[in-house]
Image (cartoon, grey):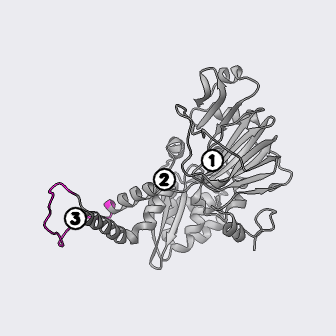
Amino acid sequence: MTEFFNTGLSQQEFLIQYWQKKPLLIRQAFADFESPVSPDDLAGLACEPEIESRLIEEKGSDGAWQVTHGPLSEDIFDRLPASHWTMLVQDVDKHLPELQSLLDPFRFIPDWRRDDLMISYAPEFGTVGPHTDGYDVFLLQAMGSRRWQISDQPVYDASLIDGLDLQIMAEFTADQAWDLQPGDMLYLPPYFAHHGVALNDCMTFSFGFRAPSRVDMLDAVINTMMEQGLGKSRYSDPDLIVTQHGSEIDSNAVVRLKQMLHHAIDEAEPFLATALGKFVTDTKSSLVDLATETFSEQASITELNSQFEQGYELARNPYYRFAWTANEMNGQLFMGGETYMVDEHGIANLAMLTEKSTLTLLDWQTLKQDTQSATLLCQLITDGGWLWLPETD
């Protein structure tokens, strides 16, 4: 079994013992790590208008814990003090696809669970304050040193400081503390309180794995039911008894409502995978413009044949999320919150169309053996999911 970094645990053992259960410190998870991104590179990204970024100043000119949303400017950087601030940039794995290889050690966790690679830079004493997150995160120290203080138990209802654009805990007591050096990594399950403070100029890579809330998933299921024309049965009460108070919603009515909702979920069961697939691949609002600027004219199988034979390769659009599901009869590919259907012959190619980073002539020779898969790739290219790379020598 594949080892989970250098912990002596297999990937499955990590999932059983730690995933969503307790924190884990991994010394030299990425041995001799050198950040492929410099602080100047990160600042450059933060200045781009289409890239989501934030600047957090613990002692800002407008008050404590001042938050400035990007795009940032040179003037902002010029006025910053020597300490006590943090710059954060979201979705760096998508803006810099060359960083995608850093995600490879986490592929044993479903890709559709992954949110993004966020990178932060902070000078000495830079911090975003003690807080909790509702998702799993791996915190890789990429440059410099950072001291992490964490709680031993999850905190589900933390008291927050009022009046801030940040969710900073009003009270925080650390149970453990570690200083992380480049290559060290800390895993934190959801809701474990943590407080990271830069000991010097440092960068931290945060690999976040999101989990939809119950409300999010109920909304997704309802939308799918409406699309499928389901859920039209109405509330019924054939067991109604004479009421003493005409305005009262009694306990029997609540029981009927609960049963009604259970029946609705049962009715939607054949489409739950569809609801989940569309939800988890929906494009983040901050990335929509970048994702959709690559739409092209309708591609054809003949054109694909010609392009591949000339040496061109396809790259998966990093701004789109992909997923797939299948049963004995058919399969579904999800991209950008949309659904693409295939029959049983196309199921074998769904992993290739959603998980590979590039498609070569050899891949195309496999895909075009099934006309449906070849046609699906044409549609995905037209919709911007796959992009032609420049010809290689």
Spatial CA distance of label 1 from label 3 is 45 Å
> For residue 209, which quarter of the picture?
bottom right
Disc 2 + disc 1, Cβ < 8 Å? no
Mark 1: secondary structure: helix
Judged left or right of residue 372, residue 238 is left
> For residue 101, which quarter of the picture?
bottom right
Q: Name the residue located 44 percent from the left edge and 58 percent from the top edge.
A: 217
Q: The residue under label 1 is which amino acid type?
A: Lys
For disc 1, the marked residue is: 94
Check the image and report above or below for 325 versus 166: below
* Image quarter (top left, top right, bottom left or bottom right) of the N terminus: bottom right
Please name which of the two marks, 1 or 3, marks the residue nearer to the observer. 3
Q: Where is residue 100 in the image (x, y as percent from the top left)?
A: 69, 53
Q: Which of 124 and 254 is in front in this view?
A: 254
Q: Give the range drawn in magenta.
A: 226-248
Q: The residue under label 2 is which amino acid type?
A: Asp
- Magenta span: predominant SS is loop
Q: Which of 234 and 96 is in front in this view?
A: 234
Mark 3: secondary structure: loop
Q: Where is residue 299 in the image (x, y as percent from the top left)?
A: 49, 56
Badge 2 crowding class, 10 Å Cα cut-off, few under 14, some 14 to 19, many 20 or more, is: some
- Whichever of callouts 2 and 3 sits on the residue coming sooner in the sequence is 3
For disc 2, the marked residue is: 282
Q: Where is residue 33 in the image (x, y as percent from the top left)?
A: 83, 49
